[in-house]
Image (spheres, rainbow, N blue to C red):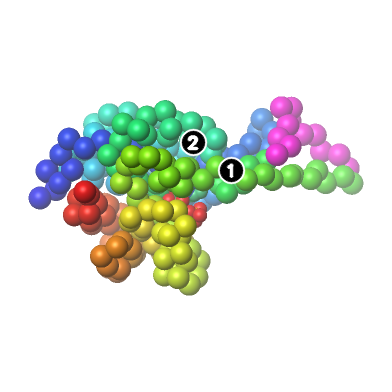
Amino acid sequence: WLSKALFGTNVMITTGATFEAIDPVRGITNISTGQMGVALARACRRAGANVTLIYGQIQTDLPNGLTHTIQAVSADAMYQAVHQSVREQDVFISVAAVADYKVKNASNEKIKKQAGVAPVIELTENPDILASVSQLDDAPFCVGFAAESHDLLNHARAKRQRKGVPLLVANLVSESMGKATNQVTLLDDEAETELPNMGKDQVAEAIVQRIAHLLP
Ligand code: C5P
């Protein structure tokens, strides 16, 4: 089935961690490795899709055979890269762990240590890339991820509504980030489907299968 499930569709995927600069050598990031998004890119490719992969910081190899691969390291850069070609997409899968905040007072010069004075880092909100895409007229079919540390399903149901996405993939941080395996629940209009703990390639295939089933 997989070889034709998304035949000829354009799929954009974001993955990895964003990096928000504090100064030219320091920044704020997170523990996402990009493996889940890369596994999804491979699965979409095997399903016959044309895949655009936009990635931040990743700790895994890029797959072959993708239509476009674009690195965008900060949330603002990722937002720009996504909106550059998201209107050509049929499906948008937002796997990236995008920082909710960036540094407001980032320095162009390396901050020097000053005895007895701790610098103050001020934060300001980043754009929500997924919500900005799901709100477009003629939006692609949007898939969001929710990584939670507790009360997974309640947070995930609320997030699916708030982000306005037809399919949300929920996982616990402890089961997913930095691991080769993942245990996810798929939430959509038809069902809440809890999948077993599996390798990320198998999880990706199950997600692709669900997308193909739900696609209008
Ligand atoms: O709100 P939260 O960060 O938990 O939402 C997670 C989902 O939203 C993921 O699909 C993530 O890729 C996306 N997201 C985004 N832009 C942000 C924050 C999250 O696209 N600034």
- Residue at 60 percent of width and 39 percent of height: 20
The residue closer to the viewer here, 16 or 158, is 158
Does the segment drawn in magenta span residue 107? yes
Magenta residues, start to end: 104-115
The residue to which callout 1 is attached is 126
Q: Residue at x 35, y 33 (%)?
A: 87
**Is 48 left, or right, of 180 in this rendering?**
left
Q: Nearer the viewer, residue 126 or 136?
A: 136
**Ligand 1 contact, mark 2 (Cβ < 8 Å):** yes
Is residue 172 shown to the viewer in this render?
Answer: no
Q: Secondary structure at mark 1?
A: loop
The total number of labels drawn is 2
85 or 193, nearer to the observer: 85
Q: Secondary structure at mark 2?
A: helix
Mark 1 CB lies closer than 8 A to ligand 1: yes
Instruction: Please state which amino acid type lies under the numbered disc 1.
Output: Asn
Please provide percent x and percent y for residue 215. Answer: 22, 49
- State which quadrant residue 68 falls in: top left
Which one is earlier in the sequence, the residue at label 2 or at label 1?
Answer: 2
Q: Which residue is mark 2?
A: 79
Residue 23's place in the image compared with 180, above or below, is above
Query: Which of the numbered marks, if any, corresponds to residue 52?
Result: none
Judged by its main secondary structure, the magenta piece is: loop
